Image (cartoon, helix red, strand yellow):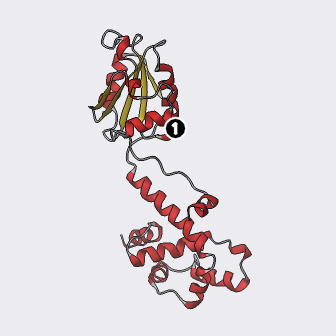
Amino acid sequence: MSNNLIDMEETVTHTGPKGVINDWRRFKLESMDQQNLPPAKRELLRQMSSPSKSRDDTRANLNRKMSVQEYELLKEEDEGCLKKYRRRCMQEMHDKLSFGPKFEGVHDLDSGEAFLEVIEKEHHTTVVVVHIYKIGIKGCEELNNCFDCLATEYPTVKFCRIDAVASGAAERFSDEFLPTLLVYKAGELLGNFLACTQHLNEEFFATDVEAFLNSYGLLPEKELPGMDDEEENDIE
């Protein structure tokens, strides 16, 4: 049992002042290009992270105070490494909070049964956005194209489309009510927008549909983009 606890201490991302310092120390050591360091610093790194130490020594090493030599080594190029560390912590936190499934592309529903299954059986945290369309109706093709873009921007949202004629829903959704947008979560209808293009400009794009849905609070936060060092410097 005690060995398992030590293993957890060596791998988990810590919280609290001491834990954060220890986690930062480990990240800094792992990210350094040790081959290009002077021999003296490389030897110090070897002493700080030697795999031959006993488990008790490893635990003591994590909890000890930082030496002057170690501090001098770790503070060099600290800003760039800190950005990488911050990015990793943010991504880990984001991953822990993202409990629902992710999707690729727009899902085409070919029947009323498929439509009901998506609404009733999807994960309870997943937002489902359904476009009911009919070929030849103004705005339907454009909205389908917008869905293709939004599905890439919001992988945790399940974007679906269903042909009113092919699904047998043409009687319920006549041409004057198309295109229709329906938004569900946990089986509950959150948004019902008949002839939704009347809320958009004559010429509209994915960003316009996104803004419309966001005005009702129907879309979640976007995924964190992967930033490289140059992008992070621009932010700073």
Q: Is residue 77 above or below residue 92?
A: below
Kindly identify the residue that appears in the image at 42 percent across and 68 percent down: 8
Q: Amino acid at mark 1?
A: Thr
Q: Is the N terminus in the top left, top right, bottom left or bottom right quadrant?
A: bottom left
Report the front residue among 80 and 71. Answer: 80
Residue 12 image-quadrant placement: bottom left
Q: x, y percentage for residue 28?
A: 57, 73
Count of numbered circles in the view: 1
Q: Is residue 104 visible?
A: no
Q: Residue furthest front?
A: 202
Q: Position of residue 86 (x, y in %)?
A: 50, 65
Q: Is residue 33 left or right of residue 28?
A: right
In the rendered image, which quarter is residue 81 located in?
bottom right
Dot 1, crowdedness within 10 Å: few (<14), some or many (≥20)? some
Provide residue 228's location: percent of width, then percent of height: 61, 57
Q: Nearer the viewer, residue 134 or 14?
A: 134
Residue at x 62%, y 61% (from the top left corner): 229
From this viewpoint, which residue is outermost toward the left?
A: 188
| SS label for mark 1 | helix
- Camera-nearest residue between 1 and 143: 143
The residue at which mark 1 appears reads as 152
Residue 9 seen in the figure: yes
**Quarter of image, res 14:** bottom left
Q: Please give the name of the residue rendered at 63% of the width and 84% of the height, measured from the top-left corner.
A: 44
Name the residue at 53% across, 67% down: 85
Above or below — where is 15 with respect to 38?
above
Indicate the quadrant containing the C terminus: top left, top right, bottom left or bottom right.
bottom right
Q: Is residue 210 above or below residue 7?
A: above
Outermost residue toward the bottom in this view = 68
